[in-house]
Image (tube, rainbow, N blue to C red):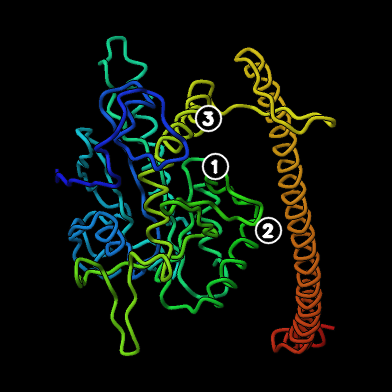
Amino acid sequence: MQHIRFNLQDTENMSSSTDIDATKDVGFANLPNCIDPTDFSFNMLLVGESGLGKSSFLNSFFESHLCTMEPYTPLELLQSDKPRIVSPRMKVTLKENGVDLALSVIETQGFGDFINNDGCWKPIVKEIETSLGNFMNEEARVQRTTTILDERIHCCLYFIAPSGHGLTALDIEAMKQLQDKVNLIPVIAKGDLLTSEEMDNFKTCIIRDIKKHEIEIYKFPGTSDDWAVSVDEGDKQVQVRLPFAVCGSEFLSNKDRVRKYPWGSVEVYNKEHSDFTALRKLLIRTHMHDMIEFTHVNHYEKFRSKQLSGMALKDTSDNDNQPSYKTPMEQFEAQKVLCEEMIVKKEKEMNTVFIEKFNEKKTQLTKLEADLLEQHEKMEIKLKQKQSILENKRREFEVEKAQFVADSPSKKGKDRTKRLFK
């Protein structure tokens, strides 16, 4: 566990009152004024293909060398004893004005790095559902602790490759699988690779794809119709258009993280170069409590409802498209009807298969009987032919025998004796 002092605002003149001025920046030091527990936690999930700068983003986000993940290749993942996509949680403690925030970060490893990426989001979904299930189990204990360790994922940053052509098929499917389980925030990785005009066009393409495929992302409160969110910059409001274009760097120059190129430098914390500072303020300073609350009220309650009532059956009418959840008895009756219908369907299928097999066997037997009759007829014809041949040979033999007897010497001697005694 690492401890980082993370001062996001000047808290010297902070009032002891529980009332919060909504016009000013609010850091997590004000979480005691928002929620009751004494221990605060915030969990982030970073999803994206390898090489998009997730580790550099984390180090830049916390202004420290937090992520020390060693480089790897997809072949190493396949050859390892326990290949994984979800890496172990990296846990840090942020301190601000005497308030400790336990923050954990999960980074994906090998996501989208294979030729066949079908189902590569399943370990991520499993990790999210496992954290929700663990929290529900802790709540369901007969004797539970006063404070439950909250390991639920409150925020998922989905890193999009800066291709300039919108979302890929993998991005669309993965975001669809995650949209109803976590607060999904799309982020354009390596935003310094595109010009300002290319970035605007790319954001337009991503927004178009999100609307086309009906992907639900987390919209910060106050987001306008053109997907622009207001960020406080001192005494003025700055509009930042979603999705956020960020970049990270491991190189420090005058306490500022920069990326140096032959034609110039990109400052990570410069709002003219990227949306990094705006995203960090929204996550840590102004909207952390909203994401925690939305996770508990929306995603967790949906998961809990499904777990307690099985897979909730939805009933929609012609006039009302909103799903209504049935009572357990109604679900039991509905499942009984479904099972009976399935049994009838299976019986019909088995009868159909039986008739097909019977007809097939009958056809085979009929063909076999016809072949045997044909062979029997051929054998009878051959037998008759052989019988006729043998009959002809027998007649020829009788004729030859009679002729032989007629021409034999003993018969001639008897005839001579008869002539002498006459």
How far apart are labels 2 and 3 at the CA level?
A: 25 Å
> Residue 241: where, in percent of width, then height?
55, 60
Judge left or right: residue 305 versus residue 247.
right
Dividing the image into 4 quarters, which one contains the C terminus? bottom right
Give the crowd class for mark 3: few <14, some 14-19, many >=20 residues within 10 Å.
some
Q: What element carries label 2?
A: helix
Q: Which residue is drawn at 45% across and 29% down?
A: 296
- Kind of residue indicated by mark 2: Lys
Which labelled disc corresponds to residue 212?
A: 2
Q: Residue at x 66, y 25 (%)?
A: 339
Query: Which residue is under mark 1?
Result: 221
Dividing the image into 4 quarters, which one contains the N terminus? top left
Q: Quadrant of the rendered structure where residue 258 is?
A: bottom left
Judge left or right: residue 72 versus residue 322.
left
- Residue 114 higher or lower than 120, as above or below: below
Judge left or right: residue 166 versus residue 271.
right
Q: Which marked residue is nearer to the observer: mark 1 or mark 3?
A: 1
- Kind of residue indicated by mark 3: Lys
- In-front residue for pair 173/115: 173
Residues at marks 2 and 3 touching, judged by CB atoms closer than 8 Å: no
How far apart are labels 1 and 3 at the CA level?
A: 21 Å
> Residue 75: where, in percent of width, then height?
27, 70
First in sequence: mark 1 or mark 3? 1
Query: Which residue is under mark 3?
Result: 302
- Kind of residue indicated by mark 1: Pro
Q: What element carries label 1?
A: loop
Give the crowd class for mark 2: few <14, some 14-19, many >=20 residues within 10 Å.
few
- In-front residue for pair 357/285: 285
Which labelled disc corresponds to residue 149?
A: none
